[in-house]
Image: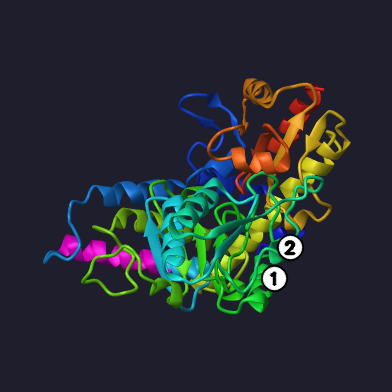
Amino acid sequence: MDKEYEKGLYSPELMEEIRSRFEYVDSDPYSGKRIYFEAASGSLRPKSVIEAMANETRLPDQQGRANPGSAHSVEVTAKGIEDLMIFFGAKSGQTIPGWSSSHVIYRITNAVLSSIPGTNVVTTGLDHASVRSAITQFSEKYGKEERIAEPNRETGSVELDTIFKKIDKDTCFLAVIHTSNVTGEIFDVRTIVEEARKIKPELYIMVDGVQYTPSDLVDVEEIGADAYVFAPYKNYGVKGCGYAHVSDRLAKLPHWKYIYKPETSWDLGGVEHQSYAAWSAVVDYLCWLGGHFTDSTDRRALVLAAMKSIKAHSTGLLSTLINGTDKTTGFKDMKHVTVYGMGEDLSSRACLVGFNLEGIESAKGCELYKNERLRLHAPGQDPFFAAMLKQLGISSFIRLSACHYNTPEEIELFLKATASFA
């Protein structure tokens, strides 16, 4: 088997195969040729995922009807739920669908805060606006104190002790992010869950895995939280849906549901089976990729092998970005670049980097990259980033977010462009 991922980057041959499976990997209908470093805002999609979505969307049949098309949609949905459980590594619990990951986060937060006794709710200053907004609004509605574990502005990280100091016997809910969408830091959520439960054993805990899951392994049984949320459109899937795995005890909490459905059902209205079909196509793709690194035919084993290789390749790209190559200087040696929250251990980071260019406003810097046919994003004082940036003392920044379909040569082109902006 191909073990190139153990050394980091994919082999050129496999890289070519991977890129051939994605739409718009090096150009799009509006910009023409460009390099896509915007995975954190939404990844590229395999052609098979788009085809699955289109094929199922054509079918008119609703579930629960006495016809073959209806039976097919039921089977597709069941397969999609099974593939969600495989991706989560779940041996128990339930999956929750929503219009988006934010929608799922709101539903989970409302269910816990409306039902579970306690006077306070804890989250961090680096959590996404969907988490912060849900907690603020439902805390106010149900009379809870909102407690924010603030980040260290020097490191750009939230120290774990800062989180634990906010938790006490009256905390009813803890929400933490798995990977920061500003710095790319991966938080040790397993330790957070374990230590938080030492303070309050029955504490309900939700993990936002939206930025983590595209490039690293997830195992909800190992993490041990009550809810784990992700967004398929950042995981090579489609928009218009979000999913969570929830523990059986959370699934049974009072929540919006049809009265005559089971108490653990969180489906509202007709289930959109085409989104499940698209997700199964994502898992099919991961199984194809994982097949290059394991002889197993088990679907979970193939997904694990794929995600290990994706993590290794992403870390290799990040190392190229920070350290440079024999052809170009890396970020660490560029005096005109300020990188936020980058630690020494690159394995504890996603290939997502927030930075600024000296003397160049971030939106202008993003335009400079655009002129070089490099697609990045410049988050600023918008509803998604304003609260996080205030916590970090930053007004705006440029974000590069790469994925496993990106190549080291693309990183080199980015570094050469950055050097020219000095």
Q: Which residue lies at the image location 85% right of the left edge and 39% below the top edge?
A: 332
**Mark 2 belongs to which amino acid?**
Leu
- Crowding at dot 1, Cα within 10 Å, few <14 / some 14-19 / many 20+, comes out as few
Magenta segment boundaries in residue numbering: 68-82
Task: Tell me the CA gap for discs 2 and 1.
Answer: 9 Å
Amino acid residing under circle 1: Thr
Q: Is residue 222 above or below residue 256?
A: below
As drawn, the label of residue 191 is 1
Question: Can residue 324 be found in the magenta stretch?
Answer: no
Task: Tell how many labels.
Answer: 2
Quarter occupied by the C terminus: top right
Give the image location of residue 101, x and y in percent. 46, 53
Looking at the picture, tell me which residue is in the foreground, 378 or 87.
378
Q: Give the residue number, with chain letter if any, for mark 2.
A: 160
Q: Are marks 2 and 1 in contact (CB under 8 Å)?
A: yes
Asked where in the image residue 6 lies, by quadrant, the reply is bottom right
Identify the element where label 1 is drawn.
helix
Identity of the residue drawn at 84% across and 34% down: 327
Q: Position of residue 229 (x, y in %)?
A: 50, 60
Instruction: Reply above or below: 264 against 376.
Output: below
Question: Against 341, is 148 above or below?
Answer: below
Q: Please tell me which residue lies in front, 137 or 283.
A: 137
Quarter of image, res 199: bottom right
